[in-house]
Image: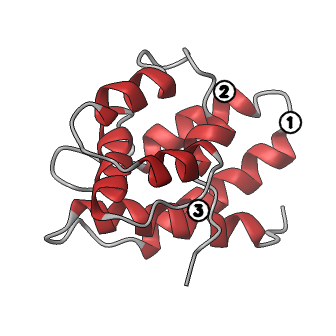
Amino acid sequence: MKSRIFLLVFVGIFVNNEAFGLSKEMAALQCKSKFRVPYSDIEKIKNRLMPETKEGKCMMACILKKLKVISKDGKFQVNTVKGWIANKYKDDTKKLNRAYAKADACAEELPTLGENECEYAVKILECSMRKKKLKIAT
């Protein structure tokens, strides 16, 4: 079953492209060169859909690692995401607090990386989409 999940939800929604050094576009280009990602997955990524192949998922893991969403030791870096959130919602305390709560919920839900960093990247993105739909009172 095809999963219609926005890719890079933390990146696409919360990141100001150049705010934290490496841009998401540069990370994507660097990671694309490391994997033989089929054209169909590149198109899915461009259209913010989850890639289906191992190569596409591994490219997403690479991007999340370069953007420091996944640490070198395989942990979801909630503080990195919170930095992006703070930058995005600096003028809206209500949205800021809701986004922080959603990021914290994913941090609690996500285990440390297992054997497969590619599938871990998928779990991060799936969690972000599930939490995005939640209504959190502030």
Work out whether residue 72 or residue 98 is closer to the camera in this orientation and state it.
Answer: 72
> Coloured how?
secondary structure
Question: What residue is rendered at 35% in x and 64% in y?
Answer: 53
Work out whether residue 31 or residue 101 is closer to the camera in this orientation and state it.
Answer: 31
Furthest residue in direction bottom, as rendered: 1
User: Reading the chain from its start, which is encountered first: label 3 or label 2?
Assistant: 2
- Which residue was labeled with disc 1? 92
Disc nearest the viewer among 3 and 1: 3
Distance Cα–Cα, label 3 vs label 2: 18 Å
In the figure, is residue 64 to the left or right of 71? right
Work out whether residue 119 or residue 4 is closer to the camera in this orientation and state it.
Answer: 4
User: Reading the chain from its start, which is encountered first: label 3 or label 1?
Assistant: 1
Q: Secondary structure at mark 2?
A: helix
Q: Amino acid at mark 1?
A: Asp
- Which residue was labeled with disc 3? 128
Q: Amino acid at mark 3?
A: Ser
In the figure, is residue 50 to the left or right of 113? right
Residue 87: mark: 2
Q: Dividing the image into 4 quarters, which one contains the C terminus?
A: bottom right
Furthest residue in direction front, as rendered: 39
Disc nearest the viewer among 3 and 2: 3
Residue 36: mark: none
Answer with the quarter of the image where residue 134 lies: bottom right
